[in-house]
Each structure stands twice: as structure tokens, then as C-alpha cells.
Image (cartoon, rainbow, N blue to C red):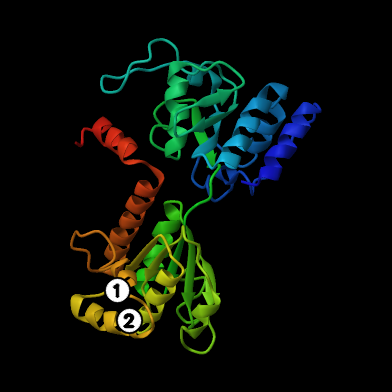
Amino acid sequence: MDKTTLQNIISDLDAGRTPVLPIEEFPCFSPAALEGNEHVDPTYLQVIAEGLTAADIPVFERALRAMNEGDLAWIGFKVVYDAAEACRNTDNEVTKKYGDVGSADGEPLVFFCNDAKEIVASRAYSDRDKFQMKDATRGPSMHNEQFEGLTWLSVPLFDAVRVWLLGASDAASEVAALAAHVGFEVTAVDYDPAYLNEGRFPDARRILLEGGNFDGLADLACAPEDYVCVLTRGHMFDPEGCVWATRHGAHYVGMMGCKGKNDTVHDLVLAKGATEQDWERVKRPIGLKFGAKTPAELAIAIVAELVDVRYRQRYSAEARAKHEASLGRE
């Protein structure tokens, strides 16, 4: 999300104009995001825009402040496709009861919600609405299909974590697809276009190195908050990948391989100027332990670990413990 977009929306609403909501800034309304959704299509974003008034300014002001403060926050959308059904409530025997009131009204709504469950909206909302609005902090996708007549979409107000895939191996290709699916920004690096191409990495930024090796990696830089997965084909350039990632202080570095290979890489990494402390920062083997062997299975193990690292990076131990307790996992 570009802060300028929020500022322009606020200015337009303050002047009584219908604001422009660029689909690039609200990708939850993109054709790709809504593919297969029988109730919503990208034109609904214009419906949202035309329904906004000056009363909605606090929503976008709070969103702008959240971005300035680095808050985990979202702009959410109530999307109504059947007003009567949206307002009708249907309780069941399993989940929480909401009584006779469904959604507070049958109109679309834009709202702000952060991970502390603070909600800003221009109109009153029902308890059931609140339950689904808070789901914006989880996608939303956990309960947006629970009730008829409406659904919920959202866009984050914080940057996605970037994952670097060093090597265009089969496992890396599988990791790229799954990592993008769960909200990571993926960059894949290799020197061979036969492996690093749009067909194998359609959702990733692709950086093709010259020279038939990874020497060009030295001209690139990752940020301290980035994650690096060392997955070079045949492990030939794993040492260069580990040295590069640790030298740039990446938040997470993981490398695929067995103990024997890793012992060899250890010596090569130290010979290239890394320290034992650098080496100890490399998670090896990469991924959670559950018997994964095929490239697709390894991708599940790797991305599951990345999700866990992201979770621990974003949330305090206290917040994680509270979440686990709410799930019945002590």
C-alpha cells in the first residue's frame, strides 16, 4: 500500500469527490484474487469507492497512522451480494451464537483493523460483523464463508517478508509457488534460464546471473529482515549462498542437505571468510522435520518453517502463548 494513495483518498473525500481506488493498491479485488469467486468481481471496488463519504475519512487516517507507526494492520471490506441474507442470522449448534441479528445492514463497508483488534468504521456494526471484521487480521479467510449474503476482503498495511531462493532447483520451484501463496514476496536467483524462467517461477521476481556461476550474487544485497533459502542445484553454490546471506545479516538463513554434505560446506564457508558464528546461523537442514523427501514435500516443510519464523518475528512470546491457549494448545 502506497501512503500517497491513502492521502489522495482522504483529500478526495474531504472535497466531496469519489476517490480513486487503484486495483494495484487493493489487490484483494484483482481478477487473480477473485478467480472462482461467484459472488464478487473486480468491478465491486468501484461500488466501494462510490459509497465512500467524508464519514469514512477516519478509517483512512487511522490506516495512514498505522503505516507510519509500522503497525500490523489492515484495511478491510464488507462485500454484500445479498442484503437480505446478509442481515439474517443463522446460528448453528457448533459455533458462537449471535441471536437474531446478522450483519448490521446490507450495505458495503470499509473499515480499519489492527492486530490489537482495534476497529475503525464509519457505521455501527453488529457483534457478528465484529467477529468477521477481526478476521481481517488472518487474511481474512477463516470465517468469511460462514454466513450467506456477504463476504470479507482485506489488504495489509505492512510489507510482505521477502524470501530469497538461491538456486532454481525443483524444490525451489515448489517453494516459490507455496511461499507466494501464503503471502511472501519471492525472489529467485540462478544463472541458467533453462531452470530460472517464468514457467517454473511464475510468481517470483527472477534474477538471472551471468557467467554460468553465482559470482554475480556479490552484486546483490538482501535486507536484514529478509529470509534466504539456499537451494542451489546440485548444492554446487551452497557455500556462496550461505556466505552471502550471513554477510548481509538476513533474519533467517536455511540450507538443504545431509550431514556429510553440510560438513563439507562448513569448511568451504569458513574458507570464504565466514565465521563459526555465521555458520551457526544457518538452519540445516532447512525445513520442519516430518519426513519430507520429494520436492513438493520439502517445499511444505520449508514454507511451514518460514511461516513459523514470520509468526515468531511478528508476535511476542506473550501473544503467541495467548494464541496457542485459545486453540487449546498449551
Residue 80 picture quarter: top right
Whether residue 112 sits left or right of residue 268 in the image: it is: right
- Residue 83 place in picture, x, y as percent: 55, 20
Disc 1 target residue: 276
Report the amino acid beneath label 2.
Leu
Disc 2 target residue: 270
Residue projecting furthest to the top: 100
Q: Can residue 322 be seen in this view?
A: yes
Q: In this view, does 74 lie above or below 52?
A: below
As measured in the structure, the alpha-carbon distance from the residue carrying label 1 to the one carrying label 2 is: 7 Å
- Residue 52 place in picture, x, y as percent: 69, 27
Q: In this view, does 300 lie above or below 57?
A: below
Residue shown at 31% from the left, 61% from the top: 302
Residue shown at 34% from the left, 71% from the top: 278
- Residue 40 place in picture, x, y as percent: 55, 37
Rendered image: mark on residue 245: none
Residue shown at 21% from the left, 75% from the top: 258
Residue projecting furthest to the bottom: 211
Q: How many labels does the image show?
A: 2
Asked whether the beta carbons under mark 1 and mark 2 sit within 8 Å of each other, the answer is yes
Residue in front for this viewpoint, 51 or 308:
308
Report the amino acid beneath label 1.
Glu
**Circle 1: element type:** helix
Image quarter hosting the C terminus: top left
- Residue 78 place in picture, x, y as percent: 54, 29
